Image (tube, rainbow, N blue to C red):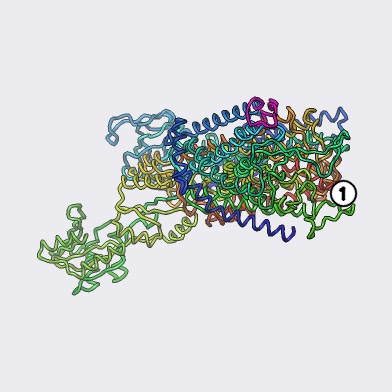
């Protein structure tokens, strides 16, 4: 790692951690029913929307009602996104006159955006009209993120309430998250991005003359290029903030009009982890013990930092095969050095690996470099971060509730080890909580393993694997790890826009979202109905370094034991083969 | 106390357990434990694969398949053995109990009122019904659990308590309960039957130790769910490895796809078989330990709850202090000598047969050598204690010597024209403040001084409370004393809190208050007035010497009637959980080494480069896989003693305990299999099996 790289990572983490407390406290207030500064501006809008939708904001829901509301809302969202795509050819704001999206791709995209995955089987600028980008995709960027946060709030209420049947009101949580958190932050971030050169226009694409004419695949001379534009900045802001990651353009944030400068890169990077990190503090404030939130954040950082370091070191040391051929991969004043294949020169190694690790730690999935071109071990890290269940920061809301599931398992184990019925934040954990936590951890895991198995065993799955050897296997494994854990980032190199992959990955995304959400809500309901046990000297503290270590161990061990064989046959053997070829 | 302890590996139990290991191969038995059932299916599958390999060329040596199959069967058998040996220990205890349950002939009283000369008829004990009244004479066995309605007798309860010294049972009071199967040694008892035959304590105890009524406890169920989920994950990991391997063979263009035998071996090694195999043995062993401590639990749930207790309510008398107050000091009034006071106190206590009275005589004798030798000569007239006067004493040679509570004596001397001197009043207050009980002594209208009676706190009890505090348990002393006295004793004994002037209602509401606050409350009790509180408490240990009502209300009965037994029960509850937790951690931590053994071996032909993971440098792929399977089976046997004895519990803080156990079972669990598998591999290649 170069000194400049280290400095940039340091500044990034410093700014991120500085934001955790103020933003976390603010979000805690939003979900507790107050919102300093914005109450006067947004309040009337909020009340108007309640009236329009006929929502009684004081009505409380049981966990089943809450779950039903989430499912109904997601289904309605899915239908809307699907319909927008299928009808875009007849609708306005379509300057490129793009036709309706194919049914399987539209299904996949609709699932992808309503599950906050934002896996993109399509290329944005060549598939989606501006209207679809805005009304279908950007809307989901807001509300699917807010839905994830709502479920987290329901779970937190499970911890804070006692002998209660209800866990809040989904509609209120959804709306307040959107209006008081995502909308204001996006309104700040989007103009900043525009100031850096991110486009925001309804104009059609620009036809420009190439400075250096070239020839296409058929040998014809190419002299002009279409520069795609569109209302990008408004979508990119929320795409980063809501851990969505679905790019306006096909190449996502490596596109110069989606992420033009180091500053825009920094802001977009910050936006990836901003809310997931701050939610830890929100959690701490809401459960009335901030140390609990810091402990969870510490656990996330303990996993994040070494993985970031290892990817960066792998990429910075470059490709040994190229070094053998005499390529200069050393960092110098004129070049970032290292393995620059698939990376943007304006970002270099550190900003690319930081993005790659952050975007897969959080279930964001946007990219500013091509993970497929990483060294085998450098590419293993993003893949494994997703396989850990998207709990290291993870998606907004979903990451933390996923981490809390692991915390429940860790508390259960440690409770047994100290000879006391396990209790977390004053709630005794019983068979029901274990059943639900097990289901939530089991299903995404199963989806990744089985999905990959089905894909590489079937002809339709193998047909579009473009790389040979273990790398081809890695690509399929990466795709299912991404979909099954609702990340959305792609290794690329895999032709995933086929009915087969659109369908199977779509299914994975549904399992990854709802087979975690529903057990989490069930746990919330069960916890809320329990009595609250006061902390005594026999209680195992869950804010100590010891507990953080145990929690990290549980996350790592479950992730490692489940995926070690698969990773061994993909990136690990690829690395060993590469080393053997020297 | 003598306890019926069996050695961990008694020859008879061992042989029976080995036989039972085979009986337990019945699929209906196996189905009860999902983890082991999966191994069981794996054993059947590999056996079929072995038979197949004999007739067809599968590319795999049939001796290797046989080796895996045999060791998988051993894995199942070892799990069965662990359960069987735990059950064996229970059965051995049950058998010794059953000896005392011989057919007894009961002498049922047929007349109306017991005690009047009524007729009795001999009936078999099994025909007795609740409410029947029987008479039991010296040398006879008590036919059923019941309540003494008449008579006093000494009873040999060694059959259930192991305690050879006989105990006294009498009608009324807190020693009126008798247990079927015990023997009257002297005198006779008239007993009213309170339980049906077959449901007596002895029967319940036998059922408990035999495991017939063992239900899974809440934490055991939760752990079983977690283990089942882990098993499922590893099943998927192993199952999906087949297509991954087929694809890899195509991708690399060399080698052979992973065989089913290796997949089954991998799955069994990864699945949490260690804890899965020992889970039921741990539970049974916990109950055995409890019955070895002479406690009958009505359910396993209660034992587990004991580990979670936050608040312990303890009766002062008998538990914290020695049975009774004792005189410790004479404080004379001014103008009276201490000896004069002691003499008067001694005389006033001559006929006082209460423990307090005797202790006054003892103190007087010790301090001044006083004896009651002149009594016959002076012809005393003793005045017994009465609730009305609240005094007792003696009238001799025309002098009225009285002792009693300060107010009572004051009223008495005033009526004679005397008064309570200020220095005596001050002494009375000082004694009360320090937790003692003042008794004022007077002769006619003159107040002579004060005797100080004090509760004597049991030796070593303070340390036990400190231990409880370390465990995170709050101790609360329950006493009928006034708050001042209670506070002083509480401070001396080192309890955290006390409830003074306790009535049954106050006890009940105290328990409810704690429970409302989310605390788990344990208490011990013996009297009928304890029953409501016992019924309300989460863990309620009734003394076997106590009344039937108390025993019915509790969820455990301590056959030794030792109130501090609760501490032992808490230990057993905690041990039960800790053993499960520690072995689960160990089991999962083991998987890391097994991956390093099996994966390079499984892909030796497809990706020889993966040999880099063969950290143990095992001699051959088949030896690597076989060694992992053998280790996995042997570790079960190796841990049986630990499962039976339980992980040691030490009263240190929760965090310290977790750190220790993580180090031993987590870090140890990572390292041990590396060594174990390597050693087995060396042995295998030494004897030329692989």
Residue depicted at x 22% and y 74%:
B337
Q: Which residue is mark 1?
A: A580
- Tell me where residue B170 sits by quadrant: top left
How far across and how far down the image is residue A413, in percent? Answer: 59, 46
Mark 1 neighbour density, 10 Å: few (under 14) some (14–19) many (20 or more): few
Figure check: B111 above or below B592: above
Figure check: B299 above or below A323: above
Does the segment drawn in magenta span residue A193?
no
Residue depicted at x 28% and y 30%:
B112
Asked if one can make out residue B214 in the rendered structure from this viewpoint, the answer is no
Instruction: Write down the region rendered in magenta.
Output: A88-109
Residue depicted at x 90% and y 52%:
A325
- Left-right relation of B203 to B632: left
Q: Nearer the viewer, residue B475 or A93?
A: A93
Q: Nearer the viewer, residue B661 or A19?
A: A19
Figure check: B563 above or below B264: below
């Amino acid at each position: 790692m170069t000194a400049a790289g280290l400095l940039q990572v340091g500044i990034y983490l410093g700014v991120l951690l500085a934001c955790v407390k103020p933003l976390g406290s603010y979000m805690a207030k939003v979900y507790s029913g107050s919102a300093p500064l914005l109450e006067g501006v947004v309040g009337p809008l909020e009340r108007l929307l309640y009236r329009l939708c006929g929502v009684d904001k004081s009505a409380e829901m049981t966990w089943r009602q809450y779950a039903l509301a989430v499912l109904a809302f997601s289904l309605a969202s899915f239908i809307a996104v699907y319909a927008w795509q299928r009808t875009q050819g007849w609708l306005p704001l379509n300057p490129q006159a793009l036709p309706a999206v194919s049914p399987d791709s539209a299904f996949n995209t609709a699932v992808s955006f309503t599950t906050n995955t934002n896996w993109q089987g399509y290329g944005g600028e060549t598939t989606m009209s501006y209207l679809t980008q805005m009304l279908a995709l950007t809307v989901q960027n807001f509300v699917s993120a807010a839905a994830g946060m709502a479920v987290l709030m329901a779970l937190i209420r499970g911890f804070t309430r006692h002998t209660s049947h209800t866990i809040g009101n989904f509609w209120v949580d959804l709306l307040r998250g959107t209006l008081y958190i995502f909308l204001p932050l996006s309104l700040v971030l989007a103009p900043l991005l525009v100031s850096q050169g991110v486009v925001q226009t309804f104009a059609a694409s620009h036809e420009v003359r190439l400075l250096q004419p070239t020839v296409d695949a058929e040998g014809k001379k190419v002299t002009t290029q279409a520069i795609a534009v569109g209302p990008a900045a408004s979508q990119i802001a929320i795409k980063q903030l809501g851990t969505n990651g679905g790019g306006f353009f096909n190449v996502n944030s490596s596109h110069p009009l989606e992420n033009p400068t180091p500053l825009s890169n920094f802001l977009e990077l910050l936006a990836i982890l901003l809310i997931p990190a701050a939610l830890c503090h929100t959690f701490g404030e809401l459960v009335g013990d901030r140390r609990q939130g810091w402990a969870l954040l510490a656990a996330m950082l303990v996993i994040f930092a070494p993985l970031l370091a290892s990817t960066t070191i792998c990429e910075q040391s470059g490709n040994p095969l190229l070094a053998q051929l005499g390529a200069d991969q050393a960092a110098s004043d004129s070049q970032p050095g290292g393995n620059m294949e698939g990376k943007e020169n304006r970002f270099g190694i550190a900003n690319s690996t930081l993005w790659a690790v952050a975007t897969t730690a959080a279930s964001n999935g946007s990219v500013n470099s091509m993970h497929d071109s990483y060294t085998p071990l450098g590419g293993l890290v993003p893949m494994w971060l997703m396989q850990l269940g998207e709990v290291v920061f993870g998606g907004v809301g979903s990451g933390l509730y996923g981490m809390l599931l692991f915390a429940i398992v860790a508390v259960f184990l440690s409770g047994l080890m100290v000879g006391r019925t396990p209790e977390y934040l004053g709630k005794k954990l019983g068979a029901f909580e274990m059943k639900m936590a097990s289901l939530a951890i089991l299903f995404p895991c199963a989806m990744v393993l089985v999905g990959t198995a089905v894909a590489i065993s079937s002809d339709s799955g193998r047909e579009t694997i473009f790389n040979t050897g273990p790398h081809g296997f890695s690509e399929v494994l990466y795709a299912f790890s991404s979909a099954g854990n609702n990340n959305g980032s792609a290794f690329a190199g895999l032709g995933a826009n086929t009915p087969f992959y659109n369908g199977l990955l779509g299914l994975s995304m549904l399992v990854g979202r709802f087979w975690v959400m529903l057990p989490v809500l069930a746990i919330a309901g069960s916890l809320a109905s329990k009595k609250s046990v006061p902390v005594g000297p026999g209680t195992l503290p869950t804010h100590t370094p010891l507990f953080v270590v145990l929690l990290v161990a549980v996350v790592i061990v479950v992730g490692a034991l489940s995926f070690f064989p698969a990773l061994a046959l993909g990136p690990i053997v690829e690395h060993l083969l590469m080393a053997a070829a020297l | 106390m003598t306890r019926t302890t069996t050695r961990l590996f008694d020859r008879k139990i061992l042989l029976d357990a080995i036989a039972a290991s085979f009986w337990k191969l019945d699929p209906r038995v196996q189905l009860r434990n999902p983890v082991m059932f999966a191994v069981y299916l794996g054993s059947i599958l590999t056996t079929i694969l072995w038979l197949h390999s004999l007739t067809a060329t599968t590319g795999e040596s049939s001796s290797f398949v046989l080796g895996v199959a045999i060791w998988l069967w051993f894995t199942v058998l070892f799990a069965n053995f662990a359960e069987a040996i735990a059950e064996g220990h229970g059965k051995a205890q049950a058998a010794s109990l059953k000896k005392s349950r011989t057919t007894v002939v009961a002498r049922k009283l047929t007349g109306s009122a017991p005690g009047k000369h009524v007729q009795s008829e001999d009936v078999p004990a099994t025909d007795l019904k609740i409410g029947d009244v029987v008479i039991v004479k010296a040398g006879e066995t008590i036919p059923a659990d019941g309540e003494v309605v008449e008579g006093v007798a000494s009873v040999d309860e060694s059959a259930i308590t192991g305690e050879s010294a006989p105990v006294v049972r009498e009608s009324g009071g807190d020693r009126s309960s008798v247990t079927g199967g015990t023997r009257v040694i002297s005198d006779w008892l008239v007993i009213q039957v309170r339980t049906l035959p077959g449901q007596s304590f002895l029967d319940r105890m036998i059922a408990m130790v035999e495991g017939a009524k063992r239900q899974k406890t809440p934490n055991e169920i939760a752990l079983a769910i977690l283990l089942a989920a882990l098993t499922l994950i590893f099943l998927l990991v192993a199952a999906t490895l087949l297509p991954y391997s087929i694809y890899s063979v195509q991708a690399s263009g060399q080698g052979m796809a992973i065989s089913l035998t290796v997949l089954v071996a991998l799955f069994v090694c990864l699945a949490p078989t260690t804890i899965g195999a020992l889970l039921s043995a741990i539970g049974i062993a916990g109950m055995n330990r409890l019955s070895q401590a002479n406690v009958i639990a009505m359910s396993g749930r209660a034992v587990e709850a004991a580990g979670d207790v936050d608040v312990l309510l303890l009766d002062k008398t008998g538990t914290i202090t020695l049975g009774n107050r004792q005189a410790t000091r004479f404080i004379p009034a001014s103008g009276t000598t201490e000896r004069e006071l002691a003499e008067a106190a001694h005389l006033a206590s001559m006929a006082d047969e209460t423990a307090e009275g005797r202790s006054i005589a003892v103190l007087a004798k010790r301090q001044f050598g006083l004896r009651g030798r002149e009594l016959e000569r002076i012809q005393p007239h003793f005045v017994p204690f009465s609730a009305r006067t609240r005094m007792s004493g003696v009238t001799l040679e025309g002098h009225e010597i009285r002792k009693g509570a300060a107010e009572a004596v004051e009223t008495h001397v005033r009526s004679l024209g005397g008064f309570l001197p200020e220095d005596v009043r001050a002494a009375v207050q000082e004694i009360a403040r320090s937790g003692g009980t003042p008794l004022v002594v007077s002769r006619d209208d003159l107040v002579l001084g004060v005797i100080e009676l004090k509760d004597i706190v049991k030796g070593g009890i303070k340390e036990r409370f400190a231990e409880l505090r370390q465990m995170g348990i709050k101790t609360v002393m329950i006493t009928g004393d006034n708050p001042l006295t209670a506070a002083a004793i509480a401070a001396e004994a080192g309890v955290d809190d006390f409830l003074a002037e306790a009535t049954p209602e106050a006890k009940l509401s105290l328990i409810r208050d704690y429970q409302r606050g989310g605390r788990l409350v344990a208490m011990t009790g013996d009297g009928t007035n304890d029953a409501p509180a016992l019924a309300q408490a989460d863990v309620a240990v009734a003394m076997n010497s106590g009344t039937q009502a108390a025993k019915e209300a509790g969820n455990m009965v301590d056959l030794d009637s030792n109130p501090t037994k609760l501490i032992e029960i808490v230990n057993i509850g905690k041990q039960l959980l800790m053993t499960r937790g520690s072995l689960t951690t160990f089991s999962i931590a083991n998987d890391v080494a097994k991956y390093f053994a099996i994966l390079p071996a499984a892909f030796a032909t497809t990706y020889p480069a993966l040999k880099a993971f063969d950290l143990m440098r095992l001699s051959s792929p088949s030896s690597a896989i076989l060694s992992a399977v053998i280790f996995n089976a042997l570790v079960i046997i190796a841990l049986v003693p630990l499962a039976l004895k339980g992980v040691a519990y030490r009263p240190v803080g929760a965090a310290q305990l977790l750190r220790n156990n993580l180090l031993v079972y987590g870090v140890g669990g990572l390292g041990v299999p590396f060594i174990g598998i390597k050693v087995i591999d060396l042995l295998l290649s030494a004897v030329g099996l692989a």
